[in-house]
Image (cartoon, rainbow, N blue to C red):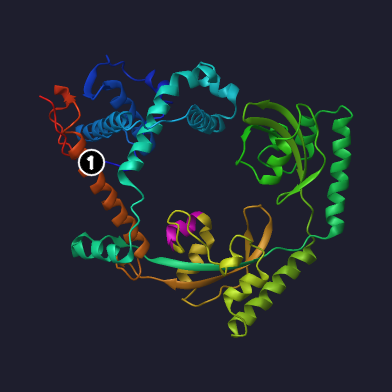
Amino acid sequence: MNLKLAFTFLFLTSLSFAQPQVLDKVVAIVGKNPLLLSEVETNLLQQREQKEKKEFTQEDRCKVFEDVLFQKLLLAQADRDSIVVSDAEVDGELNRRIQYYVGMLGSEEKFEAFYGKRISVFKDELRDDVKNQLLAQKMQQKVTGEAKLTPSEVRAFYNTLPIDSLPLINSELEISHIVRKPPISEEAKKAVRDQLGVYRSRVVNGESMSVIAALYSEDPGSAKNGGRYESVMRGQMVPEFEAVAFRLKAGEVSEIFETSYGYHFMQLVARKGESVDVRHVLMSPKISQREILKAKEELDSIRELINSGQLKFEDAALKFSSDNETKQNGGVLINPAANSAKWELDEIGQMDQNLVFMLENQMKVGDVSPVIQHVGSDAKQAWRIIYLKSRTEPHKANMKDDYIRLLNMATFERQKKSITDWIAKKSKSTYIKIDSEFNSCKLEYNWTITP
């Protein structure tokens, strides 16, 4: 059973139109909570989409059934413990989920057309399910607790693992970088602001914002749509962009403002509850070839100082790097998937495929790469050097090299034991009855079934 429950988000309603219609029935009862066959089938459909799996076995079906059975037991205990979920929490979760799908489909109008109903109707239909999911999540957090483990507890867990059960760890690398962005002259900044001022005046005087954006905006994500971004919620865009978007009135045109991408002006198209539709025009100051070459020469000089031993890489990163996200920690690149400084080569490839070839074939541990081109998250041209701090060989997990991975494994096992013990205890005091359709399932946990 996945400890992080795969609670159904019931946006699979549309999928059911293409599926054979199953006559619904109650297949289990936990306390006063019925478990419907449709809940099992909907969860199976969701997992099929997520895993791109065409067919599911009876074993898969039984596993999903037990996941939902666990959710029902959590709900029964949440009711006994008087755990509550506020309307604000439910509304927030509903808005977050709906906006995710709105973003995938492009707009609220497209969302409503796709599902054939208003968003308000969708929210009403999903409210009880989302509330139950949040209640179950709170109850599960109470069952498992924070499960903070000490190093000695992690070592004790490691010592219980048979040698042939230790996971095989692929080669992992620790890498750092120093980034140098070419400076932008004040003359280039002024030229862009002046040009944007001309375009803004044309919009204020009645010309179409959509046409101006389509003709002149340098934002590839929105220019073809007349500069339009729909259903923008807080947290989706850079802070400077959102600060302007959420203080404008409908139809109002902003002053020129700056973000890491360049200079903009914006018009508010519509405000829809917690989201806004906007149009904007983006222009970035142009960097001269001389400035680009100067930045490369500067980084070449920094590299020479590092290689000669006159400057440590981490000190150079703090002093010279243009990457504010990494310079404070010596330029170390953090792998978001593992929340650590260790990367497998295929993970680096998702970031920069050219970097993989260089690290795999041209660099040894301790090497600093030549200056190479780099395009950061702001889509601007820059240069960088890479430092290969360490490289492990494929190996069985061990405490020295793989502590974080073993900590996660030990935490998982601790939480799983908490759930096992809790189910064994609570199922004895809770009415549980399972339909004969699922009697043949070999369930993972020790459920006490009411005859």
Query: Which residue lies most toward the top here?
Result: 23
Q: Which residues are magenta?
A: 343-350
Verify whether residue 346 appears in magenta: yes
> In the rendered view, would you say 161 is above or below 63?
below
Verify whether residue 66 appears in magenta: no
**Residue 4 in view here:** no
Quadrant of image for the C terminus: top left
Where's residue 8, x and y in %? 37, 30
Q: Tell me which corner region of the image, top left, top right, bottom left or bottom right, holds residue 207.
A: top right
- 231 and 307: which is toward the camera: 231
Quadrant of image for the N terminus: top left
> In the rendered view, would you say 121 is above or below 313?
above
Where's residue 55, x and y in %? 28, 32
- 119 and 228: which is toward the camera: 119
> In the rendered view, would you say 78 is above or below 126?
below
- 83 and 238: which is toward the camera: 83
Say whether residue 111 is left or right of residue 278: left
Q: Secondary structure at mark 1?
A: helix
Say whether residue 446 is left or right of residue 234: left
- The mark total stands at 1
Where's residue 268, x and y in %? 74, 30
- Which three-letter amino acid code belongs to the residue tagged 1? Trp
Where's residue 286, x and y in %? 79, 55
**Residue 434 in view here:** yes
> In the rendered view, would you say 427 is above or below 412?
above
Query: Which residue lies most toward the left here?
Result: 451
Say whether residue 19 is left or right of residue 263: left
Residue drawn 21% across and 38% down? 423
Q: Which residue is mark 1?
A: 422
